[in-house]
């Protein structure tokens, strides 16, 4: 597809479309993070209740990516992309309606679950769309779109939601109504994203590219069917079930938690440990998101040029570990104004760590899948992410609740995230060893053509 003169220019329209969709979806998902204290106060939530708003968007939906991967492989990306955004819009509407209720929590959880299904569904579809247009060139760079624009959307959700809330609060005089109108903004953005996606994917050029993907997948399955049963099992093992593949899947589950597990409560964490105001804390949370945004472009380009994928997994886990160690004990350094520079530097490095993980992980899944199983490969990765993140985020919320009366209520949550970071480092070391045993290596070499 990438070599076709007719389709090649159009792939950058696809890139822009996917960028916008990822941005909007993460803006919607994480808009409440900039309003953490307002949700807790106005709706009488505990920290565990609040954390569950994010866990519920991934945990109960964890089984769907496995099924949705098969749906993408069978029905194609056009149908799946449009239907996934429609599901997200429905969930978002239910969430806003729940906010009008005097007992909204249960309906909020249902709505977030529906939103999670839509986002997981689109995530699987999005990677399949990019594989159609970029499998011959800039694969890691293009797959960096998810972490790149998810960071931008998360940062915008945290910062803009609070700014809009403050403006509405001054106009309306009611905190709860200001919260509701902020969430109505997310409904409008989701509607616009559905219209944009539909107009692009129903175009003639998108149809041509999708048709070619079906042909390539058919040829790959046909080649498999011509192998003997013994060779076929070897082929499947090499393509999907090697130790490297499953290590990447485990890392996919672990790798989001040390970053998102902290970022979800990052506003209150910075206020508690460093004494920031809420607006200042929201400004500081922009730093790791923006450094992750830039880092994903750089890491994606480096992987396409030189390979060495496992090194970035190892670097990511190490940076996560250093950040959480700093957050545990760095507050002792925060005595002078100059120490703000140390906090800023560590937040920048924290974002770089996430960019190393996210860009590398999705490139690895694509490399180890192939045309015929790209949907299924992404589905397994999303399944792993959903299970680990849902459980881990809830554990973080419970640990904060248990220690909420102590001097540093985030102490044991940080200890937990430290151990998760160590697990990522361990998996990365095993991945390096296993990939070096394979001849030729799959993840060490470069994949740009």
Image (tube, rainbow, N blue to C red):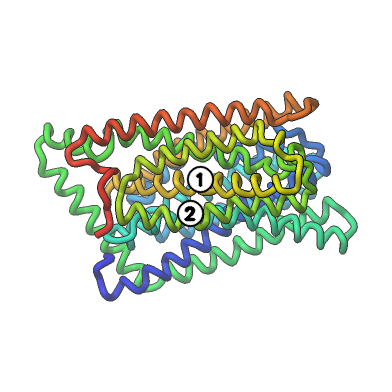
- Residue under label 2, please give it: 295
Residue occupied by mark 1? 354
Q: Nearer the viewer, residue 78 or 40?
A: 40
Say above or below: 136 vs 233. below
Horizontal relation, residue 234 to residue 448: left or right: left
Residue 292 higher or lower than 56, as above or below: below
> Looking at the rendering, in which quadrant would you find the C terminus?
bottom left
In the foreground, 286 or 264? 286
What is the x, y in percent for residue 112?
63, 44
The residue nearer to you, when weighing 385 against 345, is 345
- Are circles 2 and 1 on residues that touch, CB within 8 Å? yes
The residue lying at 48 percent from left, 54 percent from top is 295
Image side of residue 378 versus residue 52, left or right: left
In the image, is residue 94 above or below residue 314? below
Find numbered disc 2 in the image and state the secondary structure of the residue it sits on.
Answer: helix
Q: Position of residue 374 (x, y in %)?
A: 32, 48
How many numbered marks have been drawn onto this rendered protein structure? 2
């Amino acid at each position: 597809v990438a070599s076709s003169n007719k389709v090649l220019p159009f792939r950058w329209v696809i890139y822009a479309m996917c960028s916008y969709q990822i941005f909007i979806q993460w803006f919607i998902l994480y808009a409440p993070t900039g309003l953490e204290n307002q949700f807790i106060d106005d709706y009488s939530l505990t920290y565990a209740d609040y954390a569950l708003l994010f866990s519920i968007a991934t945990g109960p939906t964890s089984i769907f990516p496995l099924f949705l991967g098969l749906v993408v492989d069978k029905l194609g990306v056009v149908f799946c992309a449009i239907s996934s955004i429609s599901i997200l819009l429905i969930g978002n509407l239910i969430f806003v309606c729940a906010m009008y209720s005097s007992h909204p929590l249960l309906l909020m959880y249902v709505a977030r679950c529906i939103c999670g299904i839509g986002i997981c569904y689109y995530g699987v579809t999005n990677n399949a769309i990019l594989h159609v247009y970029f499998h011959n060139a800039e694969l890691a760079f293009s797959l960096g779109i998810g972490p790149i624009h998810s960071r931008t959307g998360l940062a915008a959700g945290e910062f803009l939601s609070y700014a809009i809330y403050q403006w509405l609060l001054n106009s309306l005089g009611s905190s709860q109504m200001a919260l509701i109108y902020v969430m109505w903004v997310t409904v409008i953005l989701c509607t616009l994203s559905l219209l944009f996606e539909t107009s692009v994917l129903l175009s003639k050029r998108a149809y041509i590219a999708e048709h070619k993907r079906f042909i390539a997948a058919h040829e790959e399955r046909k080649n498999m069917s011509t192998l003997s049963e013994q060779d076929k099992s070897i082929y499947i093992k090499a393509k999907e079930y090697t130790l490297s593949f499953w290590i990447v899947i485990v890392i996919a589950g672990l790798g989001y938690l040390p970053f998102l597990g902290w970022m979800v409560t990052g506003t209150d964490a910075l206020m508690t440990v460093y004494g920031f105001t809420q607006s200042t804390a929201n400004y500081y949370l922009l730093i790791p998101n923006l450094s992750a945004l830039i880092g994903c472009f750089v890491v994606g380009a480096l992987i396409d040029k030189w390979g060495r994928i496992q090194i970035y997994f190892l670097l990511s886990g190490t940076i996560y570990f250093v950040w959480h160690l700093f957050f545990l004990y760095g507050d002792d350094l925060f005595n002078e104004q100059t120490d703000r520079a140390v906090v800023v530097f560590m937040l920048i490095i924290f974002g770089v760590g996430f960019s190393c993980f996210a860009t590398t992980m999705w490139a690895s899944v694509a490399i180890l899948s192939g045309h015929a199983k790209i949907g299924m490969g992404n589905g397994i990765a999303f399944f792993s992410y959903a299970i680990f993140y849902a459980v881990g985020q809830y554990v973080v919320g419970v640990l904060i609740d248990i220690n909420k009366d102590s001097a540093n209520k985030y102490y044991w949550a940080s200890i937990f995230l430290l151990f998760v970071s160590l697990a990522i480092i361990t998996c990365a070391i095993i991945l390096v060893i296993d990939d070096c045993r394979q001849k030729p290596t799959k993840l060490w070499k470069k994949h740009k053509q």
